[in-house]
Amino acid sequence: MLTIDSFQRIRKVLIANRGEIACRIIRSCKELGLVSIAIYSKADRSSAHVRLADEAWLLPGNDQTAYITEEDVLDIARKSGANAVIPGYGFLSENDGFAEKVEAAGLTWVGPSSSVITQFGLKHTARELAVQAGVPVISGTDLLKSADEALAAANKIGYPIMLKATAGGGGMGLQICWNESEIEAAFASVTARGATLFKNTSMFMEKYVAKSRHVEVQVFGNGLGGAVHFGERECSIQRRHQKVVEECPSPFVHKRPEMRDRLTSCAVSLASSVNYGSAGTVEFLVDDTDGSFYFLEMNTRLQVEHGITEMCYNVDLVSLMLQQAEMQARGNGGLDIKALQALQKESPTGFAIEARVYAEVPSRNFAPSPGLLQHVDWYEAPGVRVDTWIQSGTNISPFYDPMIAKVIVWDRNSHDQATEKMLSTLTKSKVQGCPTNFQYLAAIVGSEAFKIGDTTTAFLTSDHFKFSPTTVDVISGGAYTTVQDLPARKGVGNGVPESGPMDPISFRVANILVGNDENTEALEVTLVGPELFFHAPAIVAVTGGVVDVTIDGEKADMYSQLLVPAGKKFKLGMVSSGCRSYIAIKGGFPTIPVYLGSKSTTTTLKLGGVQGRHLLPNDSLDLDPSTEEWVKDHQLISIPQSARLDALWRNKWELYVMPGPHDEPEFTTEDDRKVLYETEWKISHNATRSGYRLKGPRLTWAREDGGEGGSHPANVIDEPYSYGGLNWNGDDPVVLPIDAPMAGGLATTTTIVRADFWRLGQCRPGDSIRFKRISWDSALVLRKRSEEYISQIKEFVDGKSVNDLVPINTELPEDWEETILHQTPANAAKKTVEVKYRQAGDCHIHVTYGPMTAKALTRAHIQHRLNNINSGEVEGIIAVIGCARSYCVQFDSLKTTQKEMLHRLVELEESLGSSLEPLPSRIFKFPILLDDPLSKKAVTDYMATVRDSAVYLPDNMEYIAKANGINDRETAAKSVVTCPQLVVEVSFLAGTPLMLPLDPRLVYVAQKYNPVRAFTAEGTFGLGGPLTVIYPLESPGGYQLWGRTLSTWDPHAAKPQFEQPWLLREFDQIQFYEVNQEEFDAIYEQFKTGRLTFDIENTSFDPVAYGKFIESIAEETEEFEKKRNSATKAATQEENRLIAAWREKQAQNAAENGDSSEAEGESIPVIAPMTSSVWKVNVNVGDVVKDGQVVAILEAMKMEIAVRADASMDGKKVKKIVSPPGTVLDPGQVVLSLAA
C-alpha cells in the first residue's frame, strides 16, 4: 500500500531489532522495494530475520546486551550505508536518547519524534497530556516520594490501588495493593524494580479497577497535527500483566458502537494534540460493569499485536511508518492527512485473534524453556497468518524474550469461525523441541468464556478458566534417560546411527504391557532412574534392569501395568542388576518430533528425542490427550516372576558372536583367536551407547602395519562397521553398539549377533564378557526364540492362556564358520581384483576389493554395485554402506538367509562385470584456510595434555610433507587446491565425507593420532591413511590437521542446498580454493547464518576418461608412490620408536602414582537444567550443602532460575566451582561439583 509517489531519501533501512518483528519489517521493505539490513547476535544466527534480510551484520559484544548497545547499532548503520533506522518494539524502540542519536547521525528515525517519546515515556507526564487532551483518566496521584505519602494517598483514593513505576511498561514495575498493610512492601518492590529495570525509581498511584478490561486504540499521526485511527483491540487476557491472547475488534466494544466512537475520538485527540507522527497505541482501562474507560498509557512504537488490526482494517502499518519517515526525511513533515483518512474505516471487517506462542513451561509456572526447536511445521489455511522467526533447527536463546511466534487468524463472518480457525492452528501446528504454551493457548481459546467474550484482565486467574496440562515434568533426569523407539533409523545411513533401545526385548515388553504398539517411543534409563511428576494420570510399565519403582513413595512392581494418578511423583532408583530399565507410558510422547523417521535419541550427534539429549531437570513431556480416558480402563496386569527377563542378568556374560569381518589369517594369528574367545574381557567405565571399551590383553596381529591405512596393524583404509562389532582402536578393543560410527579405519575382528544385542544392552561397567562363537543358523535360532517370547507376552497381556511362559532360552552350541564366505580371485586379463565376501555378524555381509589401497576406479566399480542395490534389484537389504575399497549390506535375517544374500551379491558382481558407465557427480567449491589457528591450538593442547612427542608433532603439515617425500610443507599444503577431492564415502558420523584426490600423484598418506585428540574444530580438513576428511562437528579426532573449511552437515537441512542433513553424495567432488583468515571468517559467518550459497557444477565421473588419464601419468605415479612409500616407511619406524617410549613413560607414571583413571570424576555434579548464564553462586568451596538449598542462581530469558541441591547431595561438601558467574552453560553442563 503506497500513499506516496516513491522513496527518494530512504533506500536502505536498518532494522534495530530481532526475531519475528524484524521478519515482519523485512516483508514490508521487500514490498516497497527497500533494502533491508538485519543486525544479529551470535545467539541469533539461526533466526529467520538474518536469512531474509538483504544484508545481515553481526553485532559485536556479548549476546545479552548486543541489541541495546546503541553505539554498535549506529556504527553498523553508518558502515552499511543505511538511510533510516526502524526499531520495531522492545529494545531501543521507546528510547528517546537513541532516537536523538539516530537523527544526529544524519539518519531518519522511523517512528515518533524523540520529544514525543520523552513525553509519553514517563507515565505521570503522559497522564497530564491525556488530561489536557480531554481524555478520561482514573483517580491517581503525582509522583510519590515515600511509602508514608503512598499510604496517605491510598487511604484518600480508596482500595484497591496500583503503584506504578513511571518509567515502566508491559506490567513491569507494577504492584496491586488491596489494603494498607501491603503498601510499604509494594513501595519497596516498585522502587527496586524501577532501579533495576529502568534506572528510575519514581512511581505514582492509580485507583485499581478490579473487574476491568484492557482495550487499546491503534492510531497513526502525520506529525503535522493530523491523526487517524484503525479501531480498537481487546488485550484483556493477560498473565502477570503480559498479554497472551488479543482480539480485534474488542467483543465488549463491538456490542457498543457508540463506545467505539468515544474511544477512538479520545485516542485521535491525544495523538493530534502532540503532533504525533507514525504508528502509536493508546491504551485504556475499561470498567466491565458500566463501560466507563480511563487512559492508561501511550505506546510510542509499533505494538506486538498490530497484526490483528492489519487483518481487520486492510492496512500495512509498517509500510505506513516507512512512508511517513520518507516524508519527514524530505522535510515535508508527514503524509497527507486525506490519504490517511481514506484508509480509516468506521468499523472493522471481520474478526481477528492473535495468540502469542512462547517457549515456556506452563506446568512450571511458565518458566522459560530455551533450547532447540527440532521440528517446526505451521498449519496453513485461508485467514491464517503466522508471524515468526523460527524454523526447524532454530535455537531459542535464554538471552531474549521467549516469544517465538504470533499466530493470527481472521474470519470475515464471525468470531466463532475465527475461534475455530485459531483452535485448528494451535492443535495442528507442530512446534516441537523445547516446551511451548500451545496447550495453554488452546485451553484459553477453547473456553466458553472466550467464546462469549467474557474475559476481563482477571480471567486467567478466575474460576472461569481452568488449565490442567497433560504433561509429565522431569524433577530429575537420572543418570542418562533418553527417548528411544523402534525400528529407529535403521537404513538411513550417511553417518546417521541406527539408535533405538539398547535392550529392544525389554523395551518391547514394556510397550506391550501398557497397550502400546511394541515399537512406540519410551524412556531408556541407564544405571540411575529419573523422578517424574505427572500432571495427568497415565498407565505406565517398567521393565529391564532391576530397579526400585515408587509412586509417591509407595513401592510399585516392575513388569506390571501401573496407574500413576495425576499429581503424583513417579521415581526409579538405582539399577541394581543389569544396566538399563525401560519406562513405557500408554500413548507414548506424541509431541516428540520424528527425525529421519524416528523419535530415538542420538546424543552424540544431538539428534532426536528431547532436543537431542538425555532428560534434565525441568524438562516437560506431553502425554497423549486421551490419557484421561485410558486410565478409566486400567486393570492390573503383571508378568509372573518366573517369566521376567531379569532372571538372565549377570555380572559375567557370555555373548554370542560370529567371526569377522577381519578375524582371518590376513589380520589375526591363531594366538590372537585364543585371546579373542578365551579372555574374560572387563567392561571399562568408558562404556556408552556409542562404544563399550573393554580391558584385556593385546593382539599380536598377523601383519606389521596397516599399509596405506596407517602404522598400526589394526589400521585399515576406511571400511564399513557392523553394529555389534569388536573394533580395535589400536590396542584397545571397543564393542560398537547402535549409536556407534558407521565406518572407519580400524579392523573389526568379530561381531555380536543381532539376537544378543538385548543382553549387550544390559552389560554394565565392571562386568565381564566372554565371546562365544556360533553359526549363522544358531544365531537365527536365538532370534526366533526372542520373537516367540514377545509373542507369548502379547498373548498373556491380551488375556489368553499361555503355557510355559518363561524367559528366553539363551543356550546354544558352539558351532561356527570362518570369516570368508566366498572369494573370487583377481583376473589380470579382465583387469579385475580379488573380491572377498566376509561375514560380519548374522545381519551383515562385508565385501572387499583388492589389496589395502585406495583407487578411484575401484571405488567407481563399487558404486555401480551400490546403485544397483539401492534401486531395489537385490531383495532383502535394509541398508548398504560404500567405502573406498569395500561395501557392506545389512539384511533382515528373519526375511532372508545369509546364504541367499551371499548368492545374490556374488551373482550381482558377476553380472555387472567391469561397469564403465559415467556416474553422476557435482563439483562444489569450498574455501580452505591453511593457516588455521584452531588447528594450531588443538595441537598445542594435545602436546600439553596427552602426548608431547610424536612423529606428527609439533607440526602436522610438516609431518605430512616429510612422510610423503615432499620437499616442503607449503608445497604439500597447497596441493589440496590443485585438484578436486572425490567423495568416496559419506559415513562415519554426521554425514562425514571421506575423499580421495583425483590425481594419484597427490594421494598422500598419514597415520592417525595415537591416542586421539580430545578436540577437533567443526570443518577441520584432515588426512588419515590415503583419505582426506571434513569433520562435520566439533569432536575428538585422529586425522592429521591440514586446514579448516566448512561443515557438510546441517542436522535440520535448514541451510540452502541441503536437501538432507548431509550435503554431499558419493562421487561428488570438492574443489578447494585458498582464503586468508579475514576471508574465511566472513564466509564462515555467511554459512552459519544460512546466507551462503555454494557454487555447484553438475558433471559426471567418467571411468573411461579417468582411466586414460591414469594411464597417461602411470610412470610419474609409480615414481611418486615409490618415493612416498619409502618416506612413509621411515616415518612409521620413527613413530613406532616414539610411541614405545611414550608407553613406557606412561607405565612408569602409573606404577609411581597408581592408576587413577577409575577414580577420576568421583564427584557429584550440580548441573544447569537449561541453556542459561550463571548469575550467582551461593556457596564456596568447602561449604556443606543441605537438601533443597539454592546453591546457584542462573539467568535465562530475563528470569532467575534457582539451582537446588537434592536429597542425594545433602551433607556433601562443595569440591569445586566449575562455572563462575558470567559463564554461559548448555543444558547438562556442570555449575559446581560436590565431594562424593
Image (cartoon, helix red, strand yellow):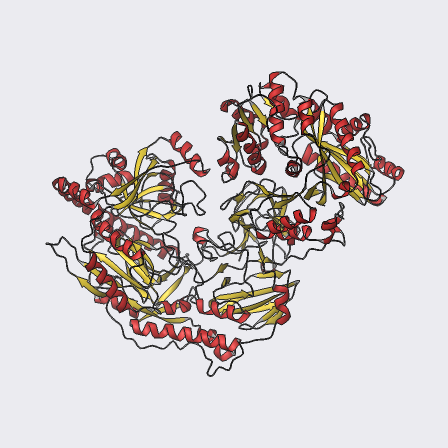
Residue ranking furthest to the front: 413
| Residue 551 visible at all | no
- Residue 479, position as x, y percentages in the image: 51, 59
**Quadrant in which the N terminus is drawn:** top right
- Residue 461, position as x, y percentages in the image: 74, 51
Query: Is residue 797 rendered to the left or right of residue 715?
Result: right
- Residue 173, position as x, y percentages in the image: 73, 38
Q: How many marks?
A: 0
User: Quick check: 86 above or below 1139?
Assistant: above
**Residue at the location (15% across, 54% down)?**
832
Residue 934 position by quadrant: top left
- Residue 192, position as x, y percentages in the image: 72, 37
Query: Is residue 476 rendered to the left or right of residue 226?
Result: left
Of residue 154 and residue 419, the one placed in the foreground of this image is 419
**Residue at the location (31% across, 36% down)?**
1072
Of residue 136 and residue 979, the one placed in the foreground of this image is 136
Of residue 955 and residue 1116, the one placed in the foreground of this image is 1116
Residue ranking furthest to the right: 156
Of residue 343 and residue 1211, the one placed in the foreground of this image is 343
User: Quick check: 613 above or below 1047?
Assistant: below
Residue ranking furthest to the left: 829
| Residue 979 visible at all | yes
Residue ranking furthest to the bottom: 803
Query: Is residue 626 rendered to the left or right of residue 375?
Result: right
Query: Is residue 286 rendered to the left or right of residue 243?
Result: right
